Image: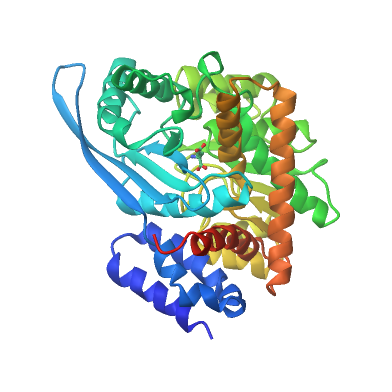
């Protein structure tokens, strides 16, 4: 038992030994699939696992641009078009110095199953660059985005591949990218990118969607335990788009969000990051592009912990890692448990290390993996695509209602798949299996392509 899965995992490790994040993501998904493979011999007969771990196409390109001193800079650009069995490639672009092919393959691979879980017709893709927007002027960011799109435009389209944002790519970058796309193609094909500003084709609630969705998912996990958000404290990492709106929704549902962080350190505010304090944080990060340290300097209820992550820094029943991959390790998982952790939902992609996840599950802490818990972002990108096709815009209430239904369904499907395949309560297995089955069946139906 398990020989087929083990053989595919060894093949991946051998061929891509330097892509450690990709290996981590692939191994987790593949290991969940053992009971599925037993019940569906056709997946092995048709080499579905060997096929699904290989991207359909990878585009890599040079991105030259001029900085404000007229010096020519060169970055690397990528788009991993991973799987189109159930819809056009869909997924964000990350601009961060840590970006490389292995990181984008991990993100693209996760995206296949996440997008499948949303129930919307979207394949999986991911892209980005090792460009660092931090400390760059608006004009530098614009020139970089224009150069990036000068190559990317020929590979994307509203029925081919639909990029969006991720770390380092927000509505400013999406604006510059869309502007250049139109200039090059003479097409006002607004559905080619999502995460657009509401004034030029975006969807209401898209900025909020990942954070709101993660909190909806957390709420469903609590309900399944007979618990609620009311009166609980929540630790959040990160301070970008996902963290900000997770904080907002937690407070709305009666919990107290008590932390945020950035690469410099974390802020703990036991009184809660709410009202004018949340407004300050949003302005600090989205407009002034400053550091969370300033929050602690401004509000006396808060303390700043230089160079530290927030895990285990205070008693909390809830946790939402919303920063980046591998930002929560086994020691931190133990510290969270000692401080009363009951449930955790991943707002970021793969923030918990494999041993931390194992620890949560072994200790009966409800663990919502990123590909389920943070699927609200891409789901609402899917709703943005629907509105673009309709040439209509839905109200905030309408979009949020649809997002909520999608998150409730993802939770239900993951829970049911986990139980059906022999690991009740294990959302990691449930999400991997539910996401995989739809894509794998589509691949078989469509033949060897
Ligand atoms: N980058 C987000 C994710 O990891 C959103 C992708 C999208 O909206 O296409 O799912």
Residue that appears at 32% across and 24% down: 135
31 with respect to 66 (left or right): right
Residue 118 location (% of width, % of height): 62, 46
Instruction: Classify residue 298 by image quadrant.
Output: top right
Q: Is residue 267 visible?
A: no
Question: 285 or 272: which is nearer to us?
Answer: 285
Q: Residue furthest left?
A: 71
Residue 271 location (% of width, % of height): 72, 32
275 with respect to 202 (left or right): right
Residue 284 location (% of width, % of height): 51, 21
Which quadrant, please, contains the C terminus?
bottom left
42 with respect to 401 (left or right): left
Which quadrant, please, contains the N terminus?
bottom right
Q: Residue furthest bottom?
A: 1
Instruction: Classify residue 225 by image quadrant.
Output: bottom right
Placement of 228 over or under 290, stated as above or below = below
Residue that appears at 53% across and 33% down: 239
448 with respect to 373 (left or right): left
Q: Report the colour scheme.
A: rainbow
Q: Is residue 30 visible?
A: yes
């Amino acid at each position: 038992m398990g020989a087929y899965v083990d053989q595919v995992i060894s093949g991946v490790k051998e061929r891509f030994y330097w892509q450690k994040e990709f290996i981590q993501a692939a191994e987790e998904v593949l290991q969940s699939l053992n009971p599925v493979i037993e019940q569906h011999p056709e997946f092995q007969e048709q080499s579905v696992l060997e096929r699904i771990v290989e991207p359909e196409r990878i585009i890599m390109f040079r991105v030259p641009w001029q900085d404000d001193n007229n010096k020519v800079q060169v970055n690397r650009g990528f788009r991993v078009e991973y799987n189109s069995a159930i819809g056009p490639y869909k997924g964000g672009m990350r601009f961060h110095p840590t970006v490389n092919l292995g990181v984008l393959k991990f993100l693209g691979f996760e995206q296949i199953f996440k997008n499948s879980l949303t129930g919307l017709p979207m394949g999986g893709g991911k892209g980005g660059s090792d460009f660092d927007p931090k400390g760059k002027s608006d004009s530098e960011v614009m020139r970089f985005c224009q150069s990036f799109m000068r190559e990317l435009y020929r590979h994307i389209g509203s029925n081919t591949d639909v990029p969006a944002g991720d770390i380092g790519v927000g509505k400013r970058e999406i604006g510059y990218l869309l502007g250049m796309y139109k200039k090059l193609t003479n097409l006002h094909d607004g559905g080619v990118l999502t995460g657009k500003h509401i004034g030029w084709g975006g969807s209401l609630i898209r900025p909020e969607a990942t954070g709101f969705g993660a909190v909806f998912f957390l709420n469903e996990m609590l309900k399944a335990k007979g618990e609620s958000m009311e009166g609980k404290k929540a630790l959040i990492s990160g301070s970008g788009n996902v963290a900000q709106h997770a904080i907002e929704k937690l407070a709305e549902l009666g919990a107290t969000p008590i932390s945020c962080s950035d690469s410099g350190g974390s802020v703990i505010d036991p009184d809660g990051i709410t009202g004018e304090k949340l407004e300050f944080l949003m302005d600090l990060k989205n407009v002034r592009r400053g550091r969370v340290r300033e929050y602690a300097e401004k509000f006396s209820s808060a303390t700043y912990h230089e160079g530290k992550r927030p895990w285990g820094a205070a008693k909390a029943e809830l946790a939402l890692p919303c920063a980046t991959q591998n930002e929560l390790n086994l020691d931190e998982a133990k510290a969270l448990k000692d401080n009363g952790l009951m449930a955790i939902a991943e707002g970021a992609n793969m923030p918990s290390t494999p041993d931390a996840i194992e620890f949560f599950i072994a200790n009966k802490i409800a663990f919502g993996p990123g590909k389920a818990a943070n699927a609200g972002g891409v789901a609402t990108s899917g709703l943005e695509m629907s509105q673009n096709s309709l040439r209509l815009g839905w109200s905030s209430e309408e979009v949020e209602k649809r997002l909520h239904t999608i998150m409730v369904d993802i939770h239900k499907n993951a829970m049911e798949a986990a139980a059906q395949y022999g690991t009740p309560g294990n959302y990691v297995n449930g999400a991997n299996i539910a996401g995989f089955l739809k894509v794998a069946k589509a691949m078989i139906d469509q033949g060897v392509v």
